[in-house]
């Protein structure tokens, strides 16, 4: 069974599931693909709202979803926190960690990499004692030059999240396999937003990695799920 570390399944929270019906269908799809644990990571933008307001909205959304008795009950609350200037000083930021852990999913800006981004990530580590997970690092291969990407990948104590969409591309699959071979700490997620063009896609993750890793696949899945074992 798999853990989906990045999803937008909570209804009416962001650009993900638009309503309860969509949320329920997305969760059914995840379960049918072998997922038993899903981390809900709705977008959080510090310039738009306080952490307290986000947490209240998230609770209301989660409660409404659970009242529908979805196919999966092991839904863990989290957030996808946009890295902005000063984000490390945002009051209550630690409450946006993956529930029961000190792991926090962070989304880099879709612009050229700058040193202040790394400083914010480091401050989150040192000042708050949190472990950053950088969301969908695979997407930045089209945004950063090689030196900038290397600078992000060299950040100490950081985990990198890969979107399963990489396995639809030969080049992105090679990028991911190279990270695995080099020992980078990785977790995977669907980043699902709906049931159509951004549907749950754990199936392509399983199909591709079973072929690539062969006999090592089962042990890999155990390791990849391990960050939530002791939450």
Image: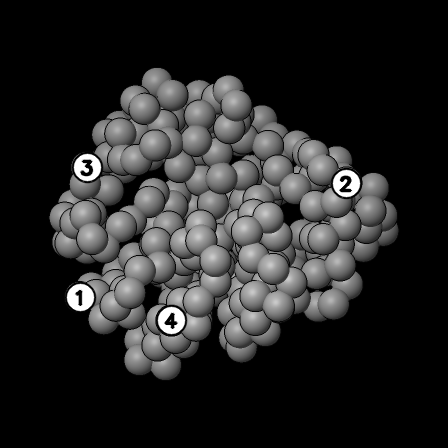
Q: Secondary structure at mark 3?
A: helix
Residue at the spot x=32%, y=24% of the render?
A: 18
Looking at the image, tell me whether mark 3 or mark 1 is earlier in sequence order: 3
To which residue does mark 3 refer?
60
| Tag 1 and tag 2, C-beta contact below 8 Å | no
Task: Kindly identify the residue that appears in the image at 34 percent across and 54 percent down.
Answer: 81
Compare marks 1 and 2 and give the one earlier in the sequence.
Answer: 1
Residue underneath mark 2? 170
N-term mark: 4 or 3: 3
Viewer-side residue, 229 vs 180:
180
Q: Between 152 and 72, which is closer to the camera in this rendering?
A: 152
Q: Is residue 152 above or below residue 69?
A: below
Q: Is residue 188 left or right of residue 215?
A: left
Q: Using the numbered discs, state the Cα–Cα distance from disc 1 to disc 2 in whole angstroms.
A: 42 Å
Instruction: Please provide percent x and percent y for residue 104.
Output: 39, 61
Q: From the viewer's perspective, is the residue at label 3 or at label 1 nearer?
A: 1
């Amino acid at each position: 069974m798999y853990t989906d570390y990045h999803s937008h399944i909570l209804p009416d929270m962001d650009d993900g599931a638009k309503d309860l019906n969509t949320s329920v269908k997305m969760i059914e799809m995840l379960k049918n693909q072998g997922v038993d644990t899903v981390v809900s990571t709705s977008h959080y933008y510090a310039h738009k709202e306080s952490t307290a307001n986000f947490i209240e909205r998230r609770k209301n959304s989660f409660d409404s979803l659970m009242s529908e008795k979805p196919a999966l009950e092991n839904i863990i609350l989290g957030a996808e926190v946009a890295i902005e200037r000063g984000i490390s000083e945002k009051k209550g930021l630690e409450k946006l960690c993956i529930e029961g852990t000190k792991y926090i999913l962070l989304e880099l800006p879709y612009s050229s990499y700058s040193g202040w981004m790394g400083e914010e990530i480091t401050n989150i580590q040192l000042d708050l004692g949190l472990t950053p997970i950088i969301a969908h690092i695979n997407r930045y291969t089209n945004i950063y030059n090689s030196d900038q990407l290397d600078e992000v990948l060299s950040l100490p104590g950081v985990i990198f999240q890969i979107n399963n969409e990489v396995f639809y591309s030969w080049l992105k699959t090679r990028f991911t396999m190279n990270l695995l071979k080099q020992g980078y700490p990785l977790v995977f997620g669907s980043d699902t937003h709906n049931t159509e063009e951004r549907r749950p896609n754990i199936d392509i993750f399983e199909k591709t990695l079973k072929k690539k890793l062969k006999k090592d696949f089962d042990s890999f899945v155990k390791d990849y799920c391990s960050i939530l074992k002791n939450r």
